[in-house]
Amino acid sequence: MNWKGIFAFGIVAGLSGLLTIYGVIPARAGYAVMLIIGLAVAYWVGNFTTGRPFLHGFWVGVVYGLVAGLIGILLFDTMLANNPQMAEQMKQAKEAFSGDFDRFTRIAMWIGLPFQMVVDGLIMGVFGWVGWMIFGGKKPAEEMTAIEPVPPPPPSPEPTPPSTEPQTTEQSEEQKEL
């Protein structure tokens, strides 16, 4: 597993989460951002990992969901202040709710975080697998040899011990004449 790459995408998740919190990326554009990151994951898995494409994508999605979710939970009030459309939706939901809406919202976000991580992981896992299929994937190092290794020579036959019988040499007639 390429954990450096997985956590690098976690940094991207933190950056996209902060940009959403501060209103640079509109809250409705979350799916577009996820699509762009998914395409980047597909490219990365297809070109820079050496196997297990779904798992690479899955773990990218889990880390992405964790980082983005925690940023959303911890900076929820800032997100509402910088995203007026989301604040309006929350105000309408608050009017329809008869309890402590702010507390309910935070608890629901904490409970939903593991589900978000799994769903993001599954989505990114599919992107990773598709990227592996499209880009051909990188083979493990032992399979990437350009030249086939030369097999070792067969073992030499065991030497025969010298015989103790006297050796007779037969000479041809031509040799006798010389």
Image (cartoon, rainbow, N blue to C red):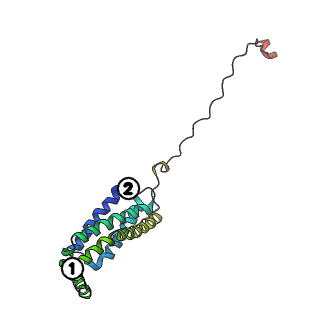
Location of residue 77 (image quadrant)? bottom left
Label 2 residue SS: loop
Side of 124 relative to 174 (left or right): left
The residue labelled by disc 2 is 2
Residue depicted at x 62% and y 35%: 154
| Amino acid of disc 2 | Asn
Where's the N terminus, which quadrant? bottom left
Furthest toward the front, the residue is: 99
N-terminal-most mark, 2 or 1 = 2
- The front one of 27 and 133 is 27
The residues bearing labels 2 and 1 have C-alpha atoms spaced at a distance of: 35 Å
| Amino acid of disc 1 | Asn
Q: Is residue 39 above or below residue 52?
A: below
**Which of the labelled discs sits on residue 83, or is there none?**
1
- The front one of 66 and 41 is 66
Side of 157 relative to 14 (left or right): right
Residue depicted at x 24% and y 84%: 94
